[in-house]
Image (cartoon, grey):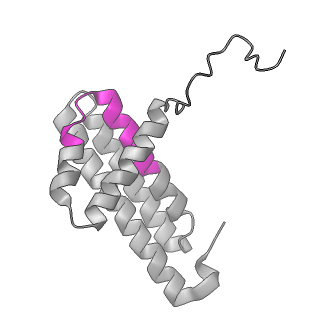
Amino acid sequence: MVGATGGRDSGGVTAPSQSPADLGAHRAAEYLRLLDADRSDEAEALLAGLTDARELVFVGAGFTALARRTGRTLPTAMRAQASTRQVLLGQLRDASRRDPDGLRRWLREAGEEVRTVNRLAEAARLRLGDQAAVS
């Protein structure tokens, strides 16, 4: 049968819905892009628009993934320091678990950590060349 769709409607192309984790990672990346473009008011508005603790935590998970991925590329001592900062950020998150304003503070700190780790990784690459890259 030509044109059969197996019972699915193929009348239009739709984007697949994002999982909460994917949406959180997207929001984390957007927040960082806004900060990097010196658009801190818009970055703050992005965080202010998140009112549900679950949304806030998924954005934080996006920051954590970015920071840990880049942190693994750092030289040993820097990597250890970045890991310690991640533990402290986890404690801040846990202390703010039911407080959206506290979770936003955690997100601001987590976003700055991503930016710090990125700067450290770039400095290590410039100083050490290919030796700084650890898979």
Seen from the viewer's position, the closer of residues 99 and 30 is: 30
- Seen at 53% across and 71% down, the residue is 74
Q: Is residue 113 left or right of residue 83?
A: left
Residue 127 location in percent, x, y? 51, 89
108, above or below 118, in the image: above
Farthest right residue in view = 1
Seen from the viewer's position, the closer of residues 23 and 117 is: 23
Q: Where's the C terminus, which quadrant?
A: bottom right
Farthest front residue in view = 2
- Seen at 25% across and 52% down, the residue is 108
Q: Is residue 110 left or right of residue 50?
A: right
Q: Which quadrant would residue 33 be assigned to in this image?
A: bottom left
Per the picture, the main secondary structure of the magenta-coloured stretch is helix
Residue 79 location in percent, x, y? 50, 66
Q: Which quadrant would residue 131 be assigned to in this image?
A: bottom right
Q: Where's the N terminus, which quadrant?
A: top right
**Which span of residues is magenta-colored?**
47-64
80, above or below 54, in the image: below
